[in-house]
Image (tube, grey):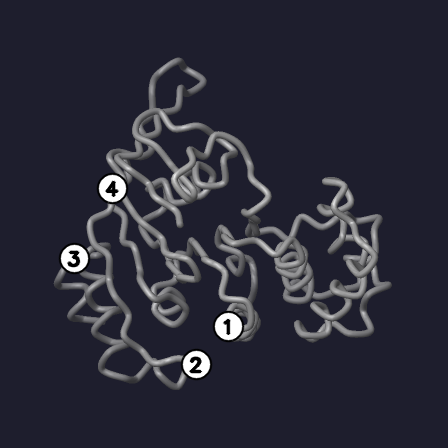
Amino acid sequence: MIRLDGVGKTFRGRDGAEVEALRDVSLNVAEGEFVAIVGASGCGKSTLLRLVAGLVGVSAGGVSLDGQAVTAPRAETAMVFQAATLLPWADVLRNVTFPLRLMGRMERDTEDKARALLATAGLAGFEGRLPRELSGGMQQRVAICRALLQEPRLLLMDEPFGALDALTREEMSIELLRLWAARRMGVLFVTHSIPEAVLLADRVVVMSPRPGRIVDVVEVALPRPRSFDQEGSDEFQRCARRIRAHIFGERAARAA
C-alpha cells in the first residue's frame, strides 16, 4: 500500500545551515499491516510520518500510496499526534466529527457511527462532555476515534501515548489493538518504548541517529490477540533485545 523509495529529507535551520533529517529510507507497508518505528530522539521518526502524510515534501526519493506519489494530505490517511489536539470549545461528539464536517463528508449516519465508535472505545455517555472534563487517556481515545471515523486505510500515530502515565499507556495500547483488529487499517506507529513497539506491531523498524536511516526491520512472531502477559515470552524478549542492541549497543542489550 505504502512505498518509500530512497527517501531523504533536508531542512534549513534558522542559521541557514542545512540539517539532514533522513537519508535513503526505503520501506513497504502492506494493507492492514501494523508497523512500529523506534529510534533515538531526533532520528527523523516524526519527519518520516509527516512525509507519508503529505504534510511536508521529500528532498530525495519518493513516497507513494497505491503507486501514486504522495504530495499532499489524502482522504485515505489519518493522523494522531502525541497531544490529543481537541477543540476546547467543542464537545466530544463534535470533536470526533469535526474533520468530516470540515471536508464536507458528513452523511445522515455519521453521528450514529461516531457514537458507536465512542462506545467501542469506552466513551459512551461522554458525547456531550468538553475536553477539559476528560482525563488524558480519555482525550486520546477521542482523538483516535476522530481518526477512525474517517475510515482511513492508513493511520499514522506519532507517539500518541507519550504524554500518558504508565498505567493509562498500557490500557490505551490494548484499546488500540482492539480497535485496529476490528478495522485492520494499515498503521505506522512512532514510539520511544521498545516494549510498546513489540507488543503492538507486526514489524518494528529501527532507525539510526540523524540522519535517520533504517538499520533493521524486526519481524514480531507473537500470536494475536496480544497482551502484556506475552512480555515474558522468548519471542518478546528476543525482539526487544535485538532492537535494544541497535539503539544502545550489544552490552546494554545483554544487561537488559
Q: Residues within 10 Å of mark 4 (few under 14, many from 20)?
A: many
Kindly report the distance in space between the C-alpha atoms of the residues bearing marks 3 and 1.
34 Å
Q: Mark 2 against mark 3, which lies toward the viewer?
A: 2
Kindly report the distance in space between the C-alpha atoms of the residues bearing marks 1 and 2.
8 Å
The residue that appears at 39% across and 24% down in the rendered structure is 11
Residue under label 1 = 181
Numbered disc 3: secondary structure:
loop
Residue type, numbered disc 4: Arg
Residue under label 3 = 249
Give x and y (percent) for residue 193. 39, 62
Q: Left or right of 83: which side holds 42? A: left
Q: Nearer the viewer, residue 146 or 137?
A: 146
Kindly report the distance in space between the C-alpha atoms of the residues bearing marks 2 and 3.
31 Å
Residue 51, placed above or below residue 131? above
Numbered disc 1: secondary structure:
helix
Residue type, numbered disc 1: Ala
Q: Residues within 10 Å of mark 1 (few under 14, many from 20)?
A: few
Residue 225's label in the rendered image is 2
Callouts 4 and 3 close, C-beta under 8 Å = no
Callouts 1 and 2 close, C-beta under 8 Å = yes
Kindly report the distance in space between the C-alpha atoms of the residues bearing marks 4 and 2.
31 Å
Residue type, numbered disc 3: Gly
Residue 213's label in the rendered image is 4
Indicate which disc, 1 or 2, sits on the residue closer to the N terminus: 1
Indicate which disc, 4 or 3, sits on the residue closer to the N terminus: 4
